[in-house]
Amino acid sequence: MADIKVEDNNVIKNHSVKKRKLDDGAEEKQPNIHSTIEDLSSFKLEKILNNNTRSKIVCLQGTFSDADGAGLVILEKYAFEEENLKSNSDYFSTSSCLKKVFHNDIYGNYEYYPVTQLNSIKATIIHPATEKHIEKYSIQNPYIVDETPDIYESIVSPFIIKEQFDLQWVYNILEHKSEVERVVYEDPDPVNGFLLLPDLKWNGTTLDTLYLLAIVNDRNIKSLRDLQGEHLPLLKNIYNKGCKTIEEKYGIAKSQLRIYLHYQPSFYHLHVHFTYLKHEAPGILAERAHLLSNVISNIELVADYYKKVTIPFVVRETDKLFKVLEEKDILKKSSLKV
Ligand code: M7G
């Protein structure tokens, strides 16, 4: 039984994340709330982990009265769908309601309540949430680490192997056990094949916020660091077939796509992000996103490029890795001689 310590102002609460031992010694995962939850009335809020007023996302930590373990509820206001606006439908119907706040000469301020179906909020629920999930969704100070191959091999790689997020959701997708109907393309080749589907962050319909994920079939590639010459056919396959599928299905040309890998990723099974260039998706900043075309080009130039270079990445104060790097004095040192 592992304990998750949840700091709620001055109160520390312990949530049990029970893992029952099965006869063969394997651990059975604690049941989650997803098969029973119908509304959020059972959610007891304990802490607001992050409230981003710009992206209009709030991350809430709490518990569900009918289930054990900590839960995270992430609420996000949707972007406007141009198609809905253009169709002139419900936005401008008499079923909507306009309340005047004030007006002054030609300027008026109103609160507008469109019909319910235009008013939905995206809700992502993670249950049972681990300490690492709570860290990931909490607001924290970021720090840049210049990760040399040596720092990767001696500190980061062993840490990742020990502490990484569970990849069960990835394997469920690859084994056609989850999100089967969401898959938009599949190349079953075990070496160069992948699956393309809408990312968890995307509802799959609002083109303005298009976000798909290509997940490779090969289970041995953890991240950008592992990529080398032999992976070029895989990377080019993802680039070409991913773009072709998105153009055919969503009408968005490859010149309008931002195609990238994260370093460090949260999940260490190689995947590539496809987002609409117009959409400022989370995680597109220079310190984390590596454009796929750039990655391909670097490897074409030097086959083991990513084994040799320093790759900066961001670590946050409450990440366990932050403490490890701090203890080894890595955060103070810059690997670059300037
Ligand atoms: P990442 O670069 O490892 O880390 O990307 P990030 O989450 O910090 O960006 C993993 C991507 O997988 C993210 O874009 C997630 O939104 C997405 N993702 C995570 N989960 C648990 C799921 C899932 O269950 N289904 C789908 N379709 N996407 C997911």
Image: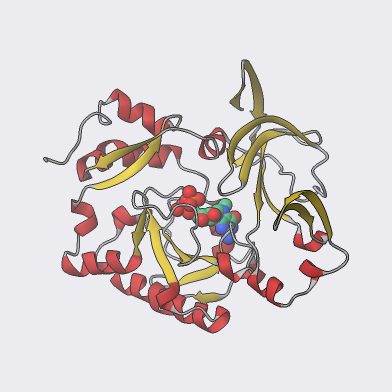
Q: Residue at x 29, y 60 (%)?
A: 227
Outermost residue to the right: 95
Outermost residue to the front: 105
Q: Residue at x 21, y 45 (%)?
A: 149
Q: Answer yes or no: is residue 28 visible.
A: no
As drawn, 32 above or below 202: above
| Near-viewer residue (251 or 296) | 251
Question: Which percent across, then down, holds residue 138?
Answer: 54, 35
Task: Kindly indicate the quadrant of the structure image that contains residue 16.
Answer: top right
| Near-viewer residue (14 or 294) | 294
The N terminus, quarter of image: top right
Question: Which percent across, then down, holds residue 314?
Answer: 36, 41
Question: Which percent across, then down, holds residue 216?
Answer: 44, 65
Using residue 114 as the reference point, say whether residue 169 is left or right of it.
left
| Near-viewer residue (327 or 176) | 327
Using residue 162 as the reference point, say whether residue 206 is left or right of it.
right
Q: Answer yes or no: is residue 271 visible.
A: yes
Task: Kindly indicate the quadrant of the structure image that contains residue 251.
Answer: bottom right
As drawn, 243 above or below 214: below
Q: Residue at x 47, y 33 (%)?
A: 140
Outermost residue to the left: 337
Q: How many marks?
A: 0
Question: Which percent across, then down, holds residue 67?
Answer: 77, 36
Outermost residue to the top: 10
| Near-viewer residue (219 or 92) | 92
The C terminus, quarter of image: top left
Using residue 114 as the reference point, say whether residue 166 is left or right of it.
left
